[in-house]
Amino acid sequence: MSQEASNARYPQLPHRLPGYSTWPQLDSSARRHGGRFGPTPDQVAAARRWVRTITALPPSEANDLDVVVSELVTNALKHSASGQDGDITLRVGRLHTGSIRIAVTDNGPRIGQDPTFLHWPEADPGLDSGRGLLLVSEMSRRVGVLGEVGGPLTVWAVLDRARNRG
């Protein structure tokens, strides 16, 4: 495919995507953790257990965290090469405010799949699926995406612990 045809088919995006400059930075004393999880559906539950263990949140505060981790990992496995014998990288960090930043990085587009760019959907009660990112944005203080069309994407969310306290 010529460069002209490629540019017409896949619009150029800036190297820095909206949200990049607002990516919540961890301070030097923040606790950080990273893990890799495989392409099978059971890895969603494994990722959720791992995040619960490292954050050490009591069950009463971990419900939103469970949903956000489940949705982000499931989307990466379902819509990217991560679900085709790949993996996902899951990073967790605590911000100085006590909030928790979750970031899931996939392996880019599936083989044979046109590169696409993630967009946050509008609420549509008629859909059988497609509400995951909407849930993530409602449960999170901030959300965003890092990456370029055709490459790996990182979807991140910041959860405010105070929201979940009884």
Image: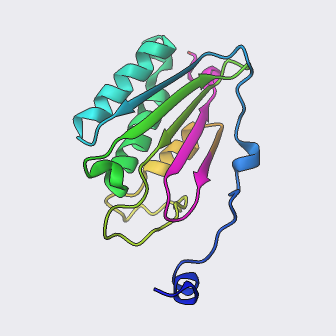
Which quarter of the rendering shows the N terminus? Answer: bottom left
Does residue 57 show up? Answer: no
When the figure is inspected, residue 54 is found, relative to residue 104, above or below; the finding is above
Q: Where is residue 54 drawn, in percent x and y?
A: 47, 14
Q: How is the image coloured?
A: rainbow
Q: Residue at x 43, y 18 (%)?
A: 52
When the figure is inspected, residue 119 is found, relative to residue 86, above or below; the finding is below
Locate residue 147 relative to residue 47 in the image: left or right: right
Q: Write down the region rendered in magenta.
A: 144-165
Q: Residue at x 28, y 33 (%)?
A: 43
When the figure is inspected, residue 47 is found, relative to residue 14, above or below; the finding is above
Q: Where is residue 144 drawn, in percent x and y?
A: 62, 48
When the figure is inspected, residue 35 is found, relative to residue 75, above or below; the finding is above
Q: Where is residue 69 drawn, in percent x and y?
A: 44, 34
Does residue 145 show up? Answer: yes
Residue 164 is inside the magenta segment:
yes
In this view, the residue in front, 91 or 133, is 91
Q: Residue at x 65, y 23 (%)?
A: 99
Report which quarter residue 46 is drawn in. top left
Report which quarter residue 162 is drawn in. top right
- Residue at the extreme front of the image, as rendered: 2
Which quarter of the rendering shows the C terminus? Answer: top right
Locate residue 158 relative to residue 41 in the image: left or right: right
Residue 81 is inside the magenta segment:
no
Q: Where is residue 76 drawn, in percent x and y?
A: 39, 48
Total tally of numbered discs in the picture: 0
